[in-house]
Amino acid sequence: MVILRNILTVIFILICIVLTVLVLLQQGKDEGLGSIGGMGNTYWSQNKGRSIEGAIVKATKWLAAAFIVFAVVLNLGF
């Protein structure tokens, strides 16, 4: 059980590092005053999910879920 716990701890640390990097890579959501006049609804904003930034957001969500799962599993104290 000690070996399994060590492996899970290493994976957890890697998830933490990658999650931190992905959060720092994300751009801010600076729509500014353009969103008031409807200028925030551009082609780029509608298709953002298909771009690299969209992939970073999706990866961040999955890694955040994995972070929570690993944190709970490691906290069980088996």
Image (cartoon, rainbow, N blue to C red):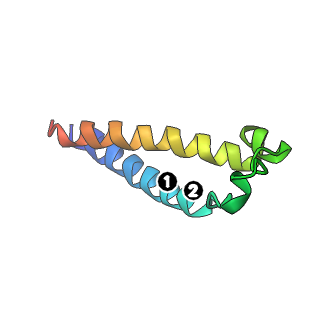
- Amino acid carrying label 2: it is Leu
* x and y percentages locating residue 10 in the rendered image: 38, 51
Q: Residue at x 45, y 50 (%)?
A: 15
The image's mark for residue 22 is 2
**Given contact means CB atoms under 8 Å apart, are the residues at marks 2 and 1 in contact?**
yes
Q: Residues within 10 Å of mark 2 (few under 14, many from 20)?
A: some
* x and y percentages locating residue 55 in the rendered image: 68, 43
The image's mark for residue 44 is none
Identify the image quadrant of the C terminus.
Answer: top left
- Amino acid carrying label 1: it is Leu
* x and y percentages locating residue 61 in the rendered image: 51, 41
Q: Which residue is mark 1?
A: 19
Helix, strand or loop for disc 2: helix
Q: Is residue 70 left or right of residue 54?
A: left
Q: Nearer the viewer, residue 31 or 50?
A: 31
Q: Residue at x 79, y 39 (%)?
A: 47
Q: Is residue 27 left or right of residue 38?
A: left
Q: Residue at x 69, y 61 (%)?
A: 33
Q: Residue at x 45, y 53 (%)?
A: 14
* x and y percentages locating residue 41 in the rendered image: 77, 44
Farthest-out residue, front:
37
